[in-house]
Every structure is written in structure tokens, then in C-alpha cells.
Image (cartoon, helix red, strand yellow):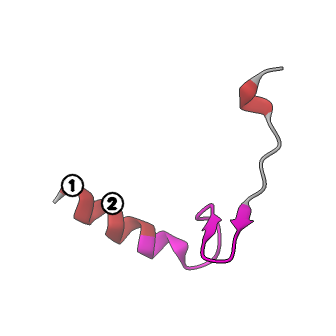
Amino acid sequence: MNPLLLNIPLQIETERLILRAPLQTGDGEIVHQQLFCLFD
């Protein structure tokens, strides 16, 4: 099986963590700010 074709959920939730892909409306500004701070 090709590992690039695995079906992985867009969001994984636990009691203390929500891990999700930045695909929701409004995420672009936050992602851009964090990347800008990373390289500053």
C-alpha cells in the first residue's frame, strides 16, 4: 500500500487536544502570522 494514499481524518480529538488541518474559514490569517513569526 502506498503510504501517501492513506485515509487520514481531517480532525483528531482527544480529551486535551484537537488536531486538525488548517482548512476552515479564517485559518489563513492565523497560519500566515505563525509562519511569519517563525522566520522573523
Q: Which quarter of the rendered picture does the C terminus lie within?
A: bottom left
Location of residue 12 with respect to 3 vertically, above or below:
below
Q: Residue at x 72, y 30 (%)?
A: 4
The mark found on residue 14 in the picture is none
Could you tell whether 17 is left or right of 34 in the image? right
Judging depth in this view, the residue of 6 and 35 nearest the camera is 6
**Segment tinted magenta in the rendering:** 11-30
Q: How crowded is mark 1: few (under 14 residues within 10 Å), some or many (20 or more)?
A: few
Q: Residues within 10 Å of mark 2 (few under 14, many from 20)?
A: few
The secondary structure type at the circle numbered 1 is helix
Please identify the quarter of the rendering in which residue 14 is found. bottom right
Residue lying furthest top: 1
Could you tell whether 30 is left or right of 24 in the image? left
* Whole-number angstrom distance, CA of label 2 to CA of label 1: 7 Å
Kindly identify the amino acid type of the residue bearing the numbered disc 2: Leu
Callout count: 2
Q: Which quarter of the rendered picture does the N terminus lie within?
A: top right
- What residue sits right under mark 1 in the picture? 39
Q: Position of residue 13 (x, y in %)?
A: 71, 70
Q: Position of residue 35 (x, y in %)?
A: 33, 60
Residue lying furthest front: 15
Q: Which residue is drawn at 43% across and 74% down?
A: 30
Location of residue 10 with respect to 28 vertically, above or below:
above
Q: Position of residue 7 (x, y in %)?
A: 83, 43
- What residue sits right under mark 2 in the picture? 35
Q: Is residue 29 magenta?
A: yes
Q: Is residue 39 magenta?
A: no
Kindly identify the amino acid type of the residue bearing the numbered disc 1: Phe
The secondary structure type at the circle numbered 2 is helix
Tell me whether circle 2 and circle 1 mark residues in contact (CB < 8 Å): yes
Location of residue 6 with respect to 9 vertically, above or below:
above
